[in-house]
Image: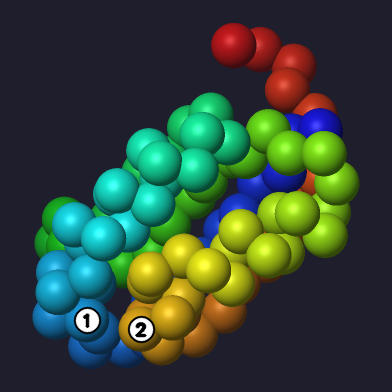
Amino acid sequence: MLIAIICTDKPGAIETRKANREAHLAYLKDTGVVQQAGPFLDDDGVMCGSLLVLDVDDMAEARTWAENDPYAKAGLFSDVRIQHWNRVIG
């Protein structure tokens, strides 16, 4: 099951993002469920959120994965949306 996780950073939280980026990237690689991932950028090209696509068994696994993301544990996000996603192209 493909699940999209769409996250918005708290305003002014770029230093929190930078401080936890290495752990976040390691988590993405180590968990083995991330199909695609990358940051959203604001008009100035500064990271301001995240989009991830997971391939997991169910929504509960996606929620658990999102809760354990080092960015989430660091309190980076103001909003997190977790939604079943249907790949049409790609």
* Quarter holding residue 45: bottom left
Residue type, mark 2 in image: Ala
Q: Is residue 82 above or below residue 79?
A: above
Q: Camera-side residue: 12 or 1? A: 1
Nearer the observer: mark 1 or 2; the answer is 2
Image quarter for residue 23?
bottom left
Give neighbour class at mark 2: few <14, some 14-19, many 20+ (Cα, 10 Å): few
> What's the residue at 41%, 87% (across, down)?
75
Q: Which residue is mark 1?
A: 16
- Under mark 1, the amino acid is Thr
Question: Disc 1 and disc 2: Cα gap in Å?
Answer: 7 Å
**CB within 8 Å, label 1 to label 2:** yes
Task: Indicate the position of residue 51 as horizontal and vertical percent values.
Answer: 49, 50
The N terminus - image quarter? top right
- Residue 73: x and y in percent read 44, 81
User: On screen, 46 above or below 11?
Assistant: above
Q: Is residue 17 visible?
A: yes
From the image, which quarter does the C terminus lie in? top right
Q: Which residue is drawn at the image coordinates 29% and 49% (left, top)?
A: 25
Quarter of the image for residue 3 reads top right
The answer, for residue 42, to whether it is visible in the render is: no
* Horizontal relation, residue 81 to residue 52: left or right: right
Dot 2: element? loop
Determine crowd level at label 1: few under 14, some 14-19, many 20+ residues with C-alpha closer than 10 A: some
Closer to us: 5 or 41: 5
Residue shown at the point (66%, 12%) measured from the top left: 89
Find disc 2 in the rendering and name its residue.
Answer: 74
Q: 36 or 65, which is in the foreground? A: 65
Taking 79 as reference, is 77 left or right?
A: left
Residue for point 40% across, 41% down: 30
